[in-house]
Image (cartoon, helix red, strand yellow):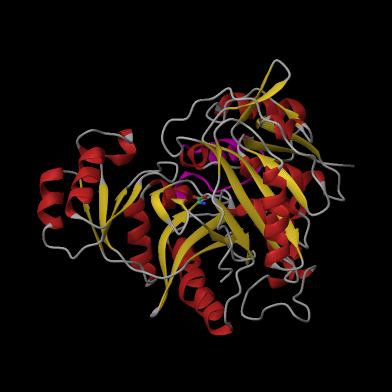
Amino acid sequence: MPGSVLVIGGGGREHAIVRQLARSPLQPTVFAAPGNPGTAMLARNVALDPSDTQGILRFCQNEGIELVIVGPEEPLIAGLADHLRHGGINVFGPGAMGARLEGDKEFAKEVLHAAGVPTPHYQAFSSSETALDHLDTMDLPVVVKACGAAQGKGVAVCSTRDEAEAFIRECLDEQRFGSSGLRILIEECISGPELSVLVVTDGQDYCLLAPSRDHKRIGEGDTGPNTGGMGAFAPVELPASLRAQIDTRVVLPILAELRRRDIPYRGVLYAGLMLTSHGPQVLEFNCRFGDPETQVVLPLLRGDLYDLCTATAAGALGDFLQQYPAGEGDPDGWPGAGVSEWGRRCVVVVGAADGYPGTCAGGRVIELPADRDGAWIVQAGTRDADGALVTAGGRVLGAVGLGADLGKARALAYELLAGTHFEGLTYRRDIAAKGD
Ligand code: GLY
C-alpha cells in the first residue's frame, strides 16, 4: 500500500525533493505545502503556510500523512517538527532544540567548542559600541554574522573597517534582519575552498550524502555580496585523508555532543565547512537540506529518498543503511558511501532575477525549455498568474545537468538555461568551472 508524504516549503529545494519522491519505486502520494508551479506538476499543492503548525497537523491527520519532510529552517526553528511528532506524525527534520544549531549561531559555536570541533575564533555582541571597539583590535578581513537565521544574507565578509562597521550597524542599530540580527558574531576570516556536507542522522546512525560545493557570491570569480547560493555541483572529489578528517574530527564529535546534551536529531545536519591548510573547520550548521545543494545531491542517490526519510524519521536509519553497503569504487572513509553514486556528476546553475540579492521585480513571464535526458529545470521563485508562469522571487529557477563528468553536466545545465527566458534573467557563467 503506497504511503503519503507531505513536503513543507515552496522553493527550489522542495521542488528537488518532490521530484525525487515522485521517482520512488514505492510510489508514495506526494503533497507540497505550499509548493510552487514546479511541484504542482508532480504532487498536489496544498495552500498551507509553513508557519501554520495547527493547520499542518490537522491536514496530516485528515489525510493520513505518514511522513512529513520539512524543507526550510524557519518552521523547524519554530518547533513544527516537535508539534507534529506530539500529534503522532513521523517527521524528517529536527525539533526546535536541534534546529537551534542553525537558529542561534552563538549556540552552535558553544556546541562546536564543547565537541572540540575546529571553527573560527569569534566573539558575540549585542551593542554596536562594544562591537566596534572589538573590531579595532582585529586584523582585517573579518566576518560579521547575524546570530539568527537570515536566509543566507546575514553574513558579511568585510575587507575594510568601513564595510564591517556598516554591517554591524545594519544588524544592531538599523535592525535590517529584525530579531535575527540583534546579536552578532565577529569572527576571524579563514580561507580555503568551502564544502557542504549533508549528514542524514536519526540521532544514532548516520550517513553522509555526496559532498557538494555551493557558489554563494552573486558575481563570477566569487565576487560581490553573499546570496542564498548561485549554483552548486556534486560530488566534490576529496582525498581519502580529508574524508577521514571530516568524519572523525567533525561529524562524529558533533553527533556525540548532541547525544550528550540529550538533543534528539532526526533529519539532515548540514555542515558548512572550510577546507583550510590545517584541516576542515566548521563555518556554520544548517538544520535542513541545502539550497541549491539538494538539487545536485539528491539525483545522485542510489537509495530511495522516500525510504531514507521514512527510516530516519522512525529512528531506523541503521536498517536502511544495511541495504546500501559501499561497493567497489565508492570512496572509503565516507560513512554511507553506498547510498550515493560516484560515477556521475551533477551541476545546478541558478537563474536569478536582476536585482538579486536585493529587491527584485516580480511578475515577469517565464518561458521554460522542455526537460531533456540528463537536464531539467527546478522551479524556485515562480508562480502561476492566470495560467502564465511568472517570476516571484530572487532565485527564480535552477537548471540541472547530470552527466558522466563535470564538463558534460555543466554543458547540459548551461544549454538548458540558454533556452530559458524572462526579462532580467541573470546567472553566473562559472558554476563548477574549477571543479575541485
Ligand atoms: N546553500 C546554502 C544554504 O542552503 O544555506
Whether residue 295 appears in magenta in the rendering, the answer is no
User: From what the image shows, is residue 147 above or below residue 114?
Assistant: above
Q: Residue at x 48, y 55 (%)?
A: 220
- Location of the N terminus by quadrant is top right
Among all residues in the image, which is located at the extreme top? 386
Q: Is residue 316 visible?
A: no
| Residue 144 left/right relative to 270 | left
Toward which corner of the image does residue 431 lie, by quadrant?
Answer: bottom right
Toward which corner of the image does residue 191 lie, by quadrant?
Answer: bottom left
Q: Residue at x 49, y 38 (%)?
A: 79
| Residue 30 left/right relative to 385 | right
Q: Position of residue 54 (x, y in %)?
A: 57, 25
Question: Range of the magenta residues?
Answer: 78-97
Q: Position of residue 168 (x, y in %)?
A: 22, 45
User: From what the image shows, is residue 199 above or below residue 56?
Assistant: below
| Residue 424 left/right relative to 416 | left
User: From what the image shows, is residue 47 above or below residue 81?
Assistant: above
Q: Is residue 126 visible?
A: yes
Q: Residue at x 48, y 68 (%)?
A: 256
Q: Residue at x 61, y 37 (%)?
A: 380
Q: Position of residue 257 (x, y in %)?
A: 44, 65
- Location of the C terminus by quadrant is bottom right
Name the one closer to the observer, 262 or 97: 97
Whether residue 83 appears in magenta in the rendering, the answer is yes
Name the one closer to the observer, 396 or 288: 396
Among all residues in the image, which is located at the extreme bottom? 241
